[in-house]
Image (spheres, rainbow, N blue to C red):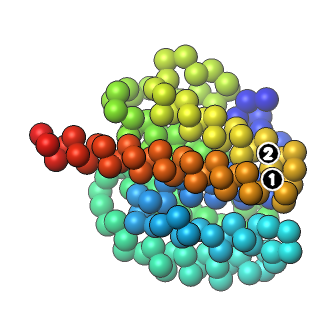
Amino acid sequence: MNLAELLAGADELTLAASGLACLDRCVSLLGGDDEALRPLWGNLAPGGDPADWPALLQQIQSKLDGCADSEDDAVLLTRAMLDGTPPDRTADTLRDWADTCSLAALRIHLLLDPTGTDTDIPRDGRTEGLPPLVVAELRRQVTVLEVVTAHGGAGLRRAVDVSTEGRRVLRAVVSRRGRVVGAS
């Protein structure tokens, strides 16, 4: 299945993991560290209480509020993902958010890709003509959706690992971009 089909058929846990994973890969743009979203990941794990989600979300939003004040499009898209996180952990509220996060994360990767390509990003499985950074993000999104769909809560560890890998890649791209811009 492609990304659009996986999102359309996802349950509450998978939608939450998908949106959170997209945000997690980009949170460093807001000044967040590797642990910034850990409380929300923990809330998704077996035994996590959905009733705790709003308070955990508020703590994270407060911690990251004002970090990386910037007019940079990638930062603004990441801020919108965080600010758009629904306070209720239900499939209805998470579906639009997960879809929005998917699109935002793909757009962020396109904006930060060193090739500077500006193109539409299909989520139907086609990757021809897309820059490598965007193709890798598409692959990560599909992997998170597939693993959580197939394994439920037991798949969250793999979803976090995929997000950690993507966050490191994005940090490296941003760092390199900063050095190139700084050298100009």
- Image position, residue 184 (x, y; %): 12, 40
Instruction: Give left or right: position of 60 versus 111.
Output: right
Q: Secondary structure at mark 2?
A: helix
**Which quadrant of the rendered structure holds the N terminus?**
top right
Q: Residue at 56% across / 42% down in the picture?
A: 103
Q: Is residue 22 visible?
A: no
Residue type indicated by callout 2: Val
Label 2 crowding class (10 Å Cα cut-off): few <14, some 14-19, many 20+?
Answer: some
Q: Is residue 56 visible?
A: yes
Disc ID at residue 155: 1
Asked if residue 48 is positioned above or below residue 130 in the image, the reply reads below
Residue at figure coordinates x 48%, y 28% from the top left: 132
Q: What element does badge 1 sit on?
A: helix
Crowding at dot 1, Cα within 10 Å, few <14 / some 14-19 / many 20+, comes out as: some
Q: Quadrant of residue 41?
A: bottom right
On the image, the x and y values in percent for residue 115 come to 35, 27
Q: Which mark is residue 14?
A: none
Residue occupying image coordinates x 65% and y 83%: 55
User: Residue farthest to the left?
Assistant: 184
Image quarter for residue 65?
bottom left
x and y percentages locating residue 60 in the rendered image: 55, 76
What residue did someone put label 2 on?
147
> Who is closer to the viewer here, 148 or 5?
148
Up-down relation of residue 105 to residue 62 (above or below): above
Q: Earlier in the sequence, mark 1 or mark 2?
A: 2
Are the two marked residues, 1 and 2, in contact with CB atoms closer than 8 angstroms?
yes
Q: Amino acid at mark 1?
A: Gly
Q: Nearer the viewer, residue 14 or 35?
A: 35
Q: Is residue 139 left or right of residue 48?
A: left
Residue 126 in the image: x percent, y percent?
63, 21
